[in-house]
Image: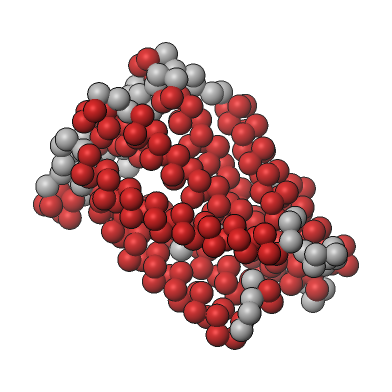
Amino acid sequence: MNTLLENCKLWTVTTSADYSLAQLLQVIILLSTGGVNGGGYQASKYVVIALHAGILLLHVFLNSLPISWLSFFGQFAAAWNVLGVFLLMILIPVVATERASAKFVFTNFNTENEGGIGNKVYIFVLGLLMSQYTLLGYDASAHMTEETKDADKNGPKGIVGAIGISLLVGWAYILGITFAVTDIPHLLNKNNDAGGYAIAQIFYDAFKNRFGSGVGGILCLGVIAVAVFFCGMSSLTSNSRMAYAFSRDGAMPFSPFWRRVNEQEVPINAVWILLEVW
């Protein structure tokens, strides 16, 4: 039972990352075509689901490639994430014409929401979910140890490094973006240009107020989109290796089928299991 629950957790992470990317792409298209107030294209939920399916399928194809290709993509993704985060955490507050005070950033506790929730403890716990979500991928180093050189050393280093880097860089990124937040109700308003997608509106407003055009903000959203794309790809890699490991030990239903590997030593059936679950 624990085996199936662990796999379900990772399948959920993979599909949620790709769905988040589908939503982000929809917002990028919306802003690129004029935004809500400029008659921009607002994709229906069916279009978003179609985007989601397409992203999942692309990730399955990429994870079917030899491990040397996945290694290249992984290194590129790591560099992209580090450089992208530092770019955004510096660029957005610098470009923004209005900045929040340090008192607002470090002491303001926002309780405004459409759900009518007023309990601060409950709101605080809900807020932790986002930071917790970003740390879920640290165990990918453990799932990939069988394909890692000097796994007894590099596996633990990857786990500890992922947690430490996420903690420090993630905190700095959140601080940088928060300094550009001055009007929370405006960011959450579904009638703003991004349709209530707060982070997109922050980027869009920063560049539009400074330069008269939100194109720069859309490009910044593109940086995030690429990072989320690689997040989904890496999540599927980790997920397929876990399914393979459990199947190899006979811990999953139909284990002989899921533990098969192809000529490139890729557990191809475990990779494609995601589409069957989806």
Observer able to see residue 196:
no
Q: Position of residue 177 (x, y in %)?
A: 28, 47
| Residue occupying the point 15% across, 44% down | 100
- In the picture provided, is 176 more to the left or to the right than 190? left
Q: Nearer the viewer, residue 71 or 25?
A: 71
Q: Is residue 193 above or below residue 175?
A: above
Marks counted in the figure total 0
Picture quadrant where residue 219 is located: top left
Please state, as top left, top right, bottom left or bottom right, where the C terminus lies in the image: top right
Q: Is residue 41 above or below residue 72?
A: above
Q: Position of residue 241 (x, y in %)?
A: 70, 66
Picture quadrant where residue 163 is located: bottom left
Q: Is residue 200 above or below residue 144?
A: above
| Residue occupying the point 31% across, 60% down | 171
| Residue occupying the point 36% across, 29% down | 215
Q: Nearer the viewer, residue 33 or 272?
A: 33
- In the picture provided, is 128 more to the left or to the right than 244? left
Identify the residue at the far top of this view: 39
Observer able to see residue 227:
yes
Q: Position of residue 207 (x, y in %)?
A: 27, 32
- In the picture provided, is 241 more to the left or to the right than 29? right
- In the picture provided, is 151 more to the left or to the right than 225? right
